[in-house]
Image (spheres, rainbow, N blue to C red):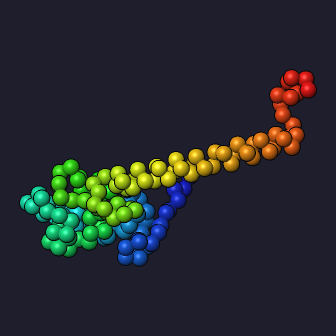
């Protein structure tokens, strides 16, 4: 017979102790967030082309919470053309991923450049190790 373990935590929003289930917050905060989400969705149904600032001003929901819901997929950006959130690197408005296309391209370019600089150093290290005369399996196979 096994006893299920009671998993409790403090709610990150209000600090109350609660039993952890599917959500990482207490039932009261979950209910409040669900109410706010539904009020945002109702507002967006009536004002389809509203921006984040307009939704925030009309519903009282913070832009950070709107961004969280967009990233979680609770607010579908394909349904609301003027909703967006900021790129994590340059703060340019984007509608998917964490970085804009320019920042992704810059990051990929930087990675390629670092890899190109690192490769000759790695080759020199390998040559230095083999010149020192460490044991090599192919020497043993060739009968040296």
Report the side of 114 relative to 50 (left or right). Answer: right
- Res 132 → quadrant: top right
Front residue (pair 139, 61): 139
In the rendered image, is residue 135 in sight?
A: yes
Q: Relative to 77, is 142 on the left or the right?
A: right
| Residue visible at 29% across and 57% down in the picture | 94
* Rendered view: 56 above or below 76: below
- In terms of depth relative to the viewer, which is nearer, 20 or 106? 106
Locate residue 93, reporting x and y percent.
28, 60
In the figure, is residue 10 to the left or right of 75?
right
Task: Using the image, determine if residue 107 lies above or below residue 8.
Answer: above
How many marks the image carries: the answer is 0
| Above-or-below relation of 20 to 131 | below
Q: Residue at x 88, y 40 (%)?
A: 133
Q: Position of residue 18 (x, y in %)?
A: 42, 69
Q: Residue at x 45, y 72 (%)?
A: 10
Q: Percent from the top left, x then y, of residue 46?
A: 8, 60
On the question of residue 74 being in view, the answer is no
Q: Is residue 8 above or below residue 101?
A: below
Which part of the image, by quadrant, shows the C terminus? top right
Residue sitting farthest toward the top: 142
**88 or 107: which is nearer to us?**
107
Lateral position of residue 79 relative to residue 13, left or right: left
């Amino acid at each position: 017979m096994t006893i299920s373990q009671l998993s409790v935590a403090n709610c990150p929003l209000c600090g109350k102790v609660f039993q952890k289930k599917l959500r990482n917050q207490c039932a009261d905060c979950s209910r409040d967030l669900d109410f706010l989400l539904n009020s945002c969705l109702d507002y967006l149904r009536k004002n389809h082309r509203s921006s984040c600032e307009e939704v925030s001003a009309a519903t009282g929901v913070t832009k950070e919470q709107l961004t969280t819901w967009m990233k979680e997929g609770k607010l579908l950006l394909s349904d609301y053309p003027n909703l967006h959130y900021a790129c994590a690197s340059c703060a340019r408005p984007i509608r998917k991923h964490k970085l804009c296309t320019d920042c992704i391209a810059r990051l990929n370019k930087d990675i390629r450049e670092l890899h190109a600089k690192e490769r000759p150093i790695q080759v020199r290290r390998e040559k230095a190790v083999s010149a020192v005369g460490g044991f090599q399996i192919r020497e043993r196979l060739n009968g040296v």
